[in-house]
Amino acid sequence: MRKMKPIRMIAAAAAAVLVIGSVSVSAAEPVDVTMAFCTWTGYAPMFIAEQQGYFEDAGINMNIEIIEDESTYAALLVQGSVQFLATAQDPNIKMYANGAPSRFVLTMDASRGADGLVTTADITSLDDLKGKTLALDTAASSYYFFLTALEDASSLTEEDIRLVEMSDTTEAGLAFMSGQVDAAIMWEPELSEALDTVEGAHALVTSADYPDTILDSLVVNADYAEKNPEIVEAVADAWYKAVDFLEENPDEAYEMMASGFEEVTAEDIAGDVEGLVFYGAEDNEQLNDGDAEGSIRAISQDMADFWMEKGECQTDDLAGFFSLLQ
């Protein structure tokens, strides 16, 4: 599904300095900015920022595009057709390491059980997957989660399992629920649906067991960031305000978050949120603190090293990626 959110039109005003907390944006008229992400609850607080006027207050005319095909994301950044992109940290690292002109802005959320490996009743350990069929989307962030779990808690490699490539994680979940495969890597809401509807189905491992494998982050085009640091800061500030609003007004927030997507309800959002942790300003300050274990740099370096070893990255040097934090 692909949907273009309407641009919030802001009345033209005389030149002014707009102050948002510690952020000041000088503008003679609203600045057009485009952000893209797919249909996922982790990014939906951006709709709170839009509807609460946080972008407007910052002098930003924000256009949010819903683009489901994540394989196009690197090209969008290269072309400069979007300035900001929200996706999982794992593919963000891979895009940067393979030449995308991206710069890390902030961590948006982390999966704490919203993603998982669901299997039939007879599969009680990862080793039991040997020779079984497993549906998954290798382009999704949950692929890194799966490989990490496989390497950590089994004697198997990918070659020991009959992997069935799917176009997306939703399709993988549906394949499992229809009995086409023995197991699948899926996320909400399919994860809960599979557990509720398939007799004997159980979550063998979830992202709650590997909390640093599936995080979402916001990145910005490197050239745009260099020329417009105040816009980058204002967009980050809008996100932090949206997370605060979500924590203080969850029911109202769920309605706003759902309204930006097609065929998504506030109840869907509420269900997804149970398996997520959203990161506000203080959380990001802690995550951004140096290279210590548990910092976003350390987590990302593990990802880069992992994919470098598998030949999926051209570099594991992330200094440029995190240059805005220096």
Image (tube, helix red, strand yellow):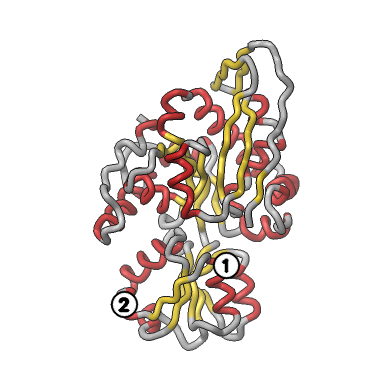
Q: Position of residue 149 (x, y in %)?
A: 37, 68
- The residue under the point 48% across, 51% down is 72
The quadrant in which residue 141 appears is bottom left
Q: Position of residue 122 (x, y in %)?
A: 47, 88
Q: Position of residue 166 (x, y in %)?
A: 49, 70
- The residue under the point 62% across, 27% down is 60
Q: Disc 2 to disc 1, how far (Cα)?
A: 23 Å
Mark 1 or mark 2, which is nearer the start of the sequence? Answer: 2
**Image check: 48 left or right of 279?**
right
Of residue 93 and residue 61, the one placed in the foreground of this image is: 61
Of residue 113 and residue 115, the one placed in the foreground of this image is: 115
Placement of 87 over or under 323, stated as above or below: below
Q: Is residue 100 visible?
A: yes
- The residue under the point 74% across, 49% down is 255
Q: Which mark is residue 170?
A: 1
Could you tell me which secondary element the residue under label 2 belongs to? helix
- Give amino acid for label 2: Glu
Find the residue positioned furthest to the top: 15
Q: Which residue is mark 2?
A: 159
- Give amino acid for label 1: Thr
- The residue under the point 44% across, 45% down is 75
